Amino acid sequence: MSLRKRTLTKLGKRKVDTAIRSLSKKLGAIPVIRVGLTEAPGQGDHTAAFSIIESLARLGFKGRVELVLKSDDDNEWVQMKEKLQLFIPEFNLDNDGVQALHYSGLDCECIPLKHLEDHCRINHRPLEQPLGFWAMRGNRSWLQSKIAIVIPPFKWTNTMPRIERKDGEYQSLELPSLANYQILYTPKKPDISELMKGDSRGARLEKVLRDTEEGRIHLLPVYGIHHRILEPAHDVIIRRLLSGAIKSHTSEFEKTVVLILSPLESLERLQALQASLKVPFYDLNNTDWVSSPNEPVELLYCGPVPKPLFEWISCVDRPLVQEGANSAAFMSLQGKTYLPLRPDGDTPLPEVITSPPTKKKSAVPTHNPVVIAERVKIEQLGRSLTHDLQAYSYYSVARDLCKKLQRVLSPMALKDVVLKYTEMVGTNHFDEADFRPLLVDSITYSRERLSEEQQEWLKCLVLANSFSPGIIPLELKSQLIEGGKALRKKRVSLEKLIAYRTSGLNMPYLRLQLSALSLRRFEVLKGVTLEHPVIFTDTAHNMDVNELAGDICDNFTLLIPALFQILRQDFSDDALMASFFEAGEGKQSLLDKIIGHLFHENMAHDSEIRSLLEPKESDIDELALFLRGEFGGAYSKQVFELMMEPKNNAVYCGLTRLTRRDWNQILPR
């Protein structure tokens, strides 16, 4: 091949042959390529896997794609199938076996991992294939490929680009900073009635899009607020976007519809926004949208939609508000502006450094001042929406965890946990080594299945209590003492068993009658009541106690200091302590209100607590300018041009790093 027909691009520290035709010829000779897809939260893994398939097709691959699907349980498999149908509408949700479909002009077999071996045997194919790809979560061993190329999405920092070989060798891929799948096309409005056949949201979305295209409304799409860091405070983000949308209007006749495309488990807080802001709210899953003529903004929840529709909605009007590598890459390759919710997170905004068109060795990368300034402003806008959500987010998560906790704790166990929590809040210090054992014991003794020995001993204790204030029969007393000692040898705390599994026992009487057991005196054993003598119910046997305890400890470790930090913004030290711990006559302290709100679902002070924790309104002037397109265009145009340079095709870069030995294993003989 003559040098005149070759293109040399520097990758890392060496130059490699990146002749498109040569690579296309090699790909065209490969009969099958495997692509791995693991179920994970969100649609990122799916989007990346299908983008790799599209990129391979554009580079010249004409063979069969075997899309190997891995899920850990039945629930994940159901979720995976629903997402697959968003990318391949022909995917049959009722078919749990192998499905032969088409994607990007290629034959695409969707193969559940558990069926891979049988499928290959039935079709007389080798189980191991020469070449495989995956994007974010995968493993060459279950993909059953001799060589696997790992190409994460654009700017995704949680996965290392690499080549894995059968002999255990890992080769790092030093991809360019703007490396992406280069899936470039202009999205076209899909036939929504066909794409979402049988989905009631389809007709409702058609109406929204029709009003957008005819200029009656602005459409502001929002995706990414389901991210684990953003979801607990998604209502604050939406509140700020609603304010920015109103501010962006230049006429009293303008209206913006904020469309939520993220999957949310609960719409409770969106409904709360409707009540507090008096903003019309519609759930398109079960409600028709009726535009209110006198409202400047409206809030619509839709949830995930098929990929072609998502892409059309993202480009049709206002900038997409998003979090995610794949959607960032898509918008960049459209030359469209977008607002990143986590510019300092997994997918930072791309840097824009260009080299001048010169062959001089002294030439250095240059910066366009306008482009750089726009990038900085967009980055700051993203931060302004989410930078101060920590305390609010931690508290929201704490409420959800405490709801779970209430279901598995007896009243006395809950009282002990609250007491310990109060002590730690009082010192502004959370000690997991002290709190976690108490929490695990409280759950375990409250609701886990009792052994036969424990049940028998408690029944005897209730029977002994019935003789109060008389003398317990000698045989029963002996049975209780011997049984109690046997349980203690098995490291059972009799005091906790009594406190968390019974109520209404005359403990002063029982302690005196069973002095040989030396039942320790503590507050919960002093009371004498008459209800619920013993609790044998088991409501925690399907719960991972250690996981729940771990989640609570992780949350409290962050919540307690964040709680104090945000309270100090509103109170001096003396005023804070007085307000937090001291209650006036007939009043509750702030700490009492928080305890009631967290642990007892007392909503009487919900507004007061949220007003303290909720971040203050940020400056929305810049947000308003951005939403109506006053800046960002120059930056987006520059990013698009740079991302489309041949050296920035991530799949291409990965393939060009394969050695001659690799190609000898991959290409058919």
Image (spheres, rainbow, N blue to C red):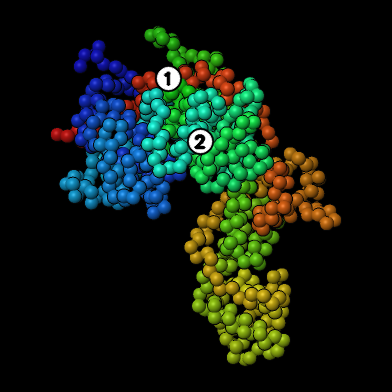
Q: Quadrant of the C terminus?
A: top left
The residue closer to the viewer here, 496 or 61, is 61
Q: Residue at x 56, y 32 (%)?
A: 257
Q: Position of residue 9 (x, y in %)?
A: 33, 19
> Where does the N terminus fall, quadrant-wise?
top left
Between residue 523 and residue 370, name the one nearer to us.
370
Q: Secondary structure at mark 2?
A: loop
Mark 1 lies on residue = 642
Residue 667 image-quadrant placement: top left
Which residue ends up furthest to the right in the rendered image?
585
Q: How many marks?
A: 2
Q: Quadrant of residue 129?
A: top left
Residue 258, image x, y percentages? 56, 33
Residue at the spot 24% in from the left edge and 14% down from the top edge: 5
| In this picture, residue 74 sits left or right of residue 233 | left
Q: Residues within 10 Å of mark 1 (few under 14, many from 20)?
A: many
Q: Give the distance between the C-alpha atoms of the residues marked 2 and 1, in whole angstroms.
A: 25 Å
| Percent x, y of residue 209 | 49, 30
* Residue hosting label 2: 223
Q: Earlier in the sequence, mark 2 or mark 1?
A: 2
Viewer-side residue, 322 vs 204: 204
The amino acid beneath tag 1 is Leu
Q: Secondary structure at mark 1?
A: helix
Is 161 above or below relative to 68?
Answer: above
In the image, residue 87 lies at what x, y percent?
Answer: 37, 38
* Residue 218 sits above or below residue 528 on the image: above
Identify the residue at image location x=30%, y=43%: 110
